[in-house]
Image: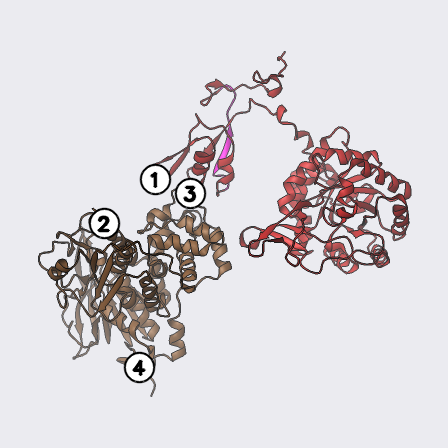
Amino acid sequence: MADLSSNFVGIKSPNPFWLASAPPTDKEYNVRRAFEAGWGGVVWKTLGLDPHIVNVNGPRYGVVYGADRRVLGINNIELITDRPLQTNLDEITAVKRDYPDRAVVVSLMVPCEEPCWNEILPKVEATGADGIELNFGCPHGMSERGMGAAVGQVPEYIEMVARWCKAATQMPVIVKLTPNITDIRYPARAAKAGGADAVSLINTVSSITSVNLDTMSPEPSIDGKGSHGGYCGAAVKPIALNMVAEIARDAETAGLPISGIGGVTTWRDAAEFLALGAGNVQVCTAAMVYGFEIVKELKVGLSDWMDSAGYDSVAAVTGRAVPNVTDWQYLNLNYIAKAKINQDACIKCGRCYAACEDTSHQAISMGEGRVFEVIDEECVACNLCVDVCPVEDCITMEQMAPGTVDPRTGKVVEEEYANWTTHPNNPAAQAAE
Amino acid sequence: MANDQWTPGVVSGRLPADQLAENFGDLHPLMDAHEALVAADRCYFCYDAPCVTACPTSIDIPLFIRQISADGTEGAAKTILEQNILGGMCARVCPTETLCEEACVREAAEGKPVEIGRLQRFATDTLMARGVHPFSRAATTGRRIAVVGAGPAGLSCAHRLAMHGHDVAMYDARAKSGGLNEYGIASYKTVDGFAQVEVDWLMKIGGITVEHGKALGDALTLDGLSGEFDAVFLGIGLGGVNALRATGEDKEGVDDAVNFISELRQASDLSSLSVGRNVVVIGGGMTAVDAAVQSKLLGAENVTMVYRRGKDRMSASEWEQDLAAQKGVRIIYGAMPVAVHGNGAAQDVEFEYTRDAGGKLEGTGETFRIPADQVLKAIGQTLDGVPDDLEISGGKIAISGAGRTSLEGVWAGGDCAAGGDDLTVTAVAEGRDAAEDIHQALSA
């Protein structure tokens, strides 16, 4: 069985699955249950200075459903901990004492003033916690008070606070990044410049999940009004994967440890985050929807896959896909494929036809008896037919062998790699040597 | 002494009232809203969907299912009812397993089609429960049309004509409107008096009068109607029944399955209905299955359905045959009745096995007897009460185009007209199409 143990910036945990800073980790009771279920670590829900904040007393979550009320995404307007600082510190101390092998990282959010950080950091360190995560991501409520995403959106602030923290504590410092920016590389670079040991991302995405058309209030609605919240869950995973990859392949931040967050629901999601450069992953929404027991599937699934794929440690997976993330201009324009429909598997729904005929390249014909066939002369291999086909592997993209003629262009498929940078249509192209 | 399943003869009260109520409950219970959403999500919204092609009324099935998914159930109902004004009944009685659901691509993919029939019922029942009638009449045209027969074809025709602003006088031989919806379909397919509820709802369009107890060839003549009205539509169904052509057909206990079903449908107290201990149903259609299953549900000990040809030729669908088997009906294929034996009352039926001799059915000479105190004949109905000057084809009123008969100004549709399957949904389509044709003819 593959070794799932994780060492993330010196913080050891028996597996790479941490619960993210959020309601599941907001008190001792939950965290003990999580550890009993098998979670490798937690990031304790964000602490702040007293007097503690308060939460709304109405709905704090909104939801986006798929079929059968499957939760695709949740947004929330919950703030940081709404309990006294000392209560949390006492509980963290007790939990860490009883679970020395698990990772206990404490999320923090205090005003952007050095004395505030200097006040809270020794208290956290005294609990025996393994590290801190700076919450520069929370997009709602706290950001209006100059904290959370309001810090995370200004790289200079990130660097400044990270530097204060590194100076004031021995604990590893993880900077949690907000996705509510235009280019994730800048805040990541700032964190690194400030001396942070790692970044974690993504925090939630600013969002309104729905509007109640009877009351004309956004959901979740508090007395007829709604506020934007932070979106999370499976729906945000593609955004998170891209941001993780951007940091992993950026020359300035290459090698900076990343804790991957955003819609991890199954072991496969976790493996994808690892492959794109994450050292471990944090989970929240899946646990909030299904409970802590999902970690059993996460652990077994990842381990089984690592065994079958020949990876003996989590570290061996980390970053494996990063070299294959590139810019569009470097994609091989001589790679030519055509869609192929397996007539034996086809159930004749015609979705490929409707998609191609109405919205793509008119490259699928509909014949007698609802026989759908690809017109190679028109097919640009866009993949939409594959995407909309309800039958797995019924439509596949088949690469054309070099030397054959692409019936669409009438040109011979070249074997050599060639990209946009040398393409004759590119005004800035450099002539190939 | 109370009767039970083993009481000899044809008697009532074989089962306690609560058991009868359970037996005759809804065969396909109404979906709840969440169930409908989950079922609707399975629809692939196929291009040029095969289910629509398979529907005799061409309901835009992917559209109405998408409307259900998108929380537009009343809109979904309107999509259905625009094509099929009796969409509520069709959702209950259509053999969807041989129509839309057989054509569903998920049937091909997984052997589990989208539950189109139940989704249709969800939509139409939702709308009807709100008492909404989503159609209104065009400005009145002053044209008057007689519709003879208030069954599915007649109702469909009348509604469409009324929508176009014509005034419709509908006549029916029976005491209630609805035709076979009211008198001829198994009770568990249309519980809680749905046939009448639907008729009442349909009549909300306005512009339709109905007179009961008036049949063609009796109180009405085609000549008289043609003279009085701008057009006539005949949706009179098949009033006669085929003879068994076996000796002893006149014995006590031998009845037409349609009568048995009709009495059952009109009964206010199921425990007052008589049923044999040993029931034999002769025939292989829906009516045979409906009669056989209901006999069993009334408490008959043994119910046997005997069909003269093989299973593959049976007009009742595979699904209907399975239903019968599941309810405890024994089905014998490939045997034809020779004689009903008994001293005054039926005691057993003698059958002869058959074989297919180059397309022609013939007896093998081997016979057997099945005990029977009740024999129900379900071997097809015949056209009845039609004037001689109307051209007949294959035992039905000959038609061309959208239900035009050989007589100028007379249209026909439903079971009485040639062509098409004898299904409620086919009758609705034919009534609707004839109405459109009449409207065009009158507007010309």
Q: Colour of chain B?
A: brown
| Labels 2, 4: one chain | yes
| Labels 3, 2: one chain | no
Residue B7's label in the rendered image is 4
Within the image, what quadrant is residue A4 found in? top right
Q: Are marks 2 and 4 in contact (CB under 8 Å)?
A: no
Identify the chain of the residue marked 1, using the numbered disc in the image: A
Identify the chain of the residue marked 3, using the numbered disc in the image: A
The residues tagged by marks 4 and 1 sit, at their Cα atoms, a distance apart of 56 Å
Q: Earlier in the sequence, mark 2 or mark 4?
A: 4
Element on which disc 4 rests: loop
> The C terminus of chain A lies in which quarter of the figure?
top right
The residues tagged by marks 3 and 1 sit, at their Cα atoms, a distance apart of 12 Å
Residue at the spot x=70%, y=50% of the render? Answer: A284
Depicted A348 relative to depicted B248: above or below: above
Magenta span includes A154: no
Q: Are marks 4 and 3 in contact (CB under 8 Å)?
A: no
* Image position, residue B288 (x, y; %): 27, 65
Residue type, mark 3 in image: Cys
Q: Which residue is mark 1?
A: A369
Residue B437's label in the rendered image is 2
Q: Residues within 10 Å of mark 1 (few under 14, many from 20)?
A: few
Q: Colour of chain A?
A: red
The residues tagged by marks 3 and 2 sit, at their Cα atoms, a distance apart of 33 Å
Residue A349's label in the rendered image is 3
Q: Is residue A145 left or right of residue B170?
A: right
User: Which residues make up the magenta segment?
Assistant: A392-403
**Residue lying farthest to the left in this orientation:** B389
Identify the chain of the residue marked 4, using the numbered disc in the image: B
| Labels 4, 1: one chain | no
